[in-house]
């Protein structure tokens, strides 16, 4: 059977050092696509593109993953502008195995994994630099590991697919669910290989996976597994590895598009102006968080102002960088007060009228996450050590506009017990990572999803089943034996 390989190709990514640009400009179908180093580069570009582009659909990190990791948690909800009943079901945690958002997330994740597999299998065949080919393979392994990390947390054990399909025969394409341990072993293998990636790239190649990014995701993997020693080890390698990572002095700069891929951004999904054009969907966060200077409720809203907006202490800059109550209306010059605080991180206040032009990256992992992960793992293993407290206090000092590396009695945490520091870290994460796809994962791994979500009246349908998502029914229709359903669905 003739093998057909289809790739999204970018005319602006070449091995000779160009910025990571994933907007597709053409489709190529070729029986023997892999011949040159440029072909290899194009295949890995397609792997990156799976994170930010999906023709005719909201992309994985552009908003679709948000439904599962934020809207189905406690702080975010579907506003009246969210007309998809499947989205509203996720918001109220009444979704089932027919949810189109769950199905799309599954498809997008495995689409990215498939693209990574194609690159990993075929890049070795091309002519060109062995150093470059090895780097490209490890970039693909990084993305594959990252995507399996999303999948195993969302669904538990999932099929492990490591090679491109060589037949369209349905039976040959079936893959049974593997154990959670087996999936994590594959994630760790991929990310371990990716640790040999370069630590930096030229400025015009910003956005590519690095060795620091591989170690950072590994730290989160081990943290999720409650493997405290390895979580501490990898977080320490990121913190002390000479990568140059640091907190921005100003919290809001994390989402300043002029400072994308800056010192705090360990790995971000790249979004460019007008990326949502040409039938492909990039980031839709702005369009769904802002509906203009009207009382119209946007599609993505805060679930409970008292439980989330009002919890920030006076002087904590994270509140006004994460939410916004008032904005000047450029048409009238007057200050407009919204009926309810809007999500702000992905709003481009210089360009509210044309959401497609927004180019704010999505931070998959940033330095503050590593500091808090190090503190959490250290506290769980050894208690509230000075090092654990200092890591948390750096995040707190930045939040309150203090010198990050200088002790400050007005904001620093001191003298806490193990339990008190655990609670403090959880509270910091709640305030730090609004709309960054962290909350649902955090609540599940802490074992408190049900108790926390029940505090929101509109989400009291939550139950233990919501610690995992259902295997999409459309997948089970193909192979109900190999894909048994999760409990409660």
Image (cartoon, grey):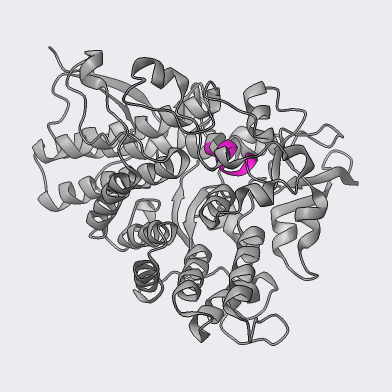
Question: Magenta stretch mostly in which secondary structure?
Answer: helix
Q: Is residue 8 magenta?
A: no
Q: Residue at x 38, y 69 (%)?
A: 238
192 to the left or right of 311: left
Q: Residue at x 69, y 36 (%)?
A: 461
Q: Position of residue 28 (x, y in %)?
A: 27, 21
Q: Is residue 413 above or below residue 130?
A: below
Q: Position of residue 184 (x, y in %)?
A: 32, 49
Q: Position of residue 217 (x, y in %)?
A: 39, 57
Residue 444 appearing in the image:
yes
Pick whichever, 420 or 209, lies toward us.
420
Q: Which residues are magenta?
A: 65-72
Q: Position of residue 486 (x, y in %)?
A: 46, 33
Q: Residue at x 32, y 40 (%)?
A: 13
Pick whichever, 441 or 42, lies toward us.
441
Pick whichever, 29 or 372, lies toward us.
372
Q: How many circles with numbers are drawn on the protein?
A: 0
Q: Is residue 426 above or below residue 351?
A: below
Residue 354 appearing in the image:
no
480 to the left or right of 196: right
Q: Is residue 451 above or below residue 489?
A: below
Q: Is residue 71 magenta?
A: yes
For the N terminus, the quadrant is: top left
Q: Is residue 402 above or below residue 196?
A: below
383 to the left or right of 87: left
Q: Residue at x 83, y 31 (%)?
A: 296
């Amino acid at each position: 059977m003739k093998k057909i390989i289809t790739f999204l190709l970018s005319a602006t990514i070449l091995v000779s050092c160009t910025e990571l640009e994933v907007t597709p400009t053409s489709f190529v179908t070729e029986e023997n696509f892999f011949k040159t180093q440029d072909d290899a580069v194009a295949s890995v570009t397609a792997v990156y593109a799976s994170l930010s582009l999906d023709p005719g659909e909201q992309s994985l990190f552009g908003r679709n993953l948000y439904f599962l990791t934020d809207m189905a948690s406690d702080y975010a909800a579907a506003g009246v502008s969210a007309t998809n009943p499947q989205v509203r079901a996720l918001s109220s945690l009444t979704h089932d195995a027919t949810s189109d958002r769950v199905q799309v997330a599954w498809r997008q994740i495995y689409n990215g994994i498939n693209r990574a597999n194609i690159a990993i299998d075929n890049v070795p065949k091309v002519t060109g630099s062995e150093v470059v080919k090895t780097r490209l393979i490890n970039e693909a392994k990084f993305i594959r590991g990252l995507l399996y990390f999303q999948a195993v947390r969302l669904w538990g054990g999932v099929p492990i697919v490591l090679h491109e399909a060589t037949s369209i025969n349905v039976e040959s394409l079936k893959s049974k669910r593997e154990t959670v341990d087996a999936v994590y072993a594959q994630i760790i293998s991929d990310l371990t290989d990716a640790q040999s990636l370069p630590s930096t790239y030229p400025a015009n190649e910003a956005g590519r996976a690095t060795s620091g990014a591989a170690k950072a995701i590994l730290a989160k993997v081990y943290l999720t597994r409650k493997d405290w020693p390895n979580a501490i080890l990898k977080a320490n390698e990121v913190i002390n590895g000479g990568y140059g990572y640091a907190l921005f002095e100003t919290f809001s700069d994390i989402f300043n598009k002029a400072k994308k891929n800056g010192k705090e951004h360990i790995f971000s999904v790249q979004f460019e102006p007008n990326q949502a054009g040409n039938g492909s969907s990039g980031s839709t966060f702005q369009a769904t968080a802002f509906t203009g200077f009207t009382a119209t409720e946007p599609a993505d809203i805060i679930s409970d102002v008292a439980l989330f907006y009002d919890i920030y202490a006076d002087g904590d800059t994270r509140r006004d960088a994460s939410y916004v109550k008032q904005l000047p209306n450029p048409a009238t010059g007057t200050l407009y007060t919204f009926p309810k605080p809007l999500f702000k991180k992905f709003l481009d206040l210089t360009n509210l009228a044309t959401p497609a032009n927004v180019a704010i990256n999505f931070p998959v992992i940033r330095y503050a996450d590593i500091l808090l992960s190090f503190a959490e793992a250290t506290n769980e293993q050894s208690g509230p050590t000075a090092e654990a407290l200092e890591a948390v206090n750096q995040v707190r000092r930045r939040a309150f506009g203090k010198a990050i590396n200088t002790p400050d009695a007005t904001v620093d945490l001191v003298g806490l017990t193990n339990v008190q520091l655990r609670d403090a870290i959880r509270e910091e994460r709640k305030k730090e990572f609004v709309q960054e796809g962290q909350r649902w994962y955090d609540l599940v791994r802490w074992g408190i999803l049900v108790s926390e979500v029940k505090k929101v009246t509109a989400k009291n349908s939550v139950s233990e089943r919501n610690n995992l998502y259902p295997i999409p029914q459309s997948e089970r229709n193909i192979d109900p034996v190999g894909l048994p359903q999760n409990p409660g669905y």
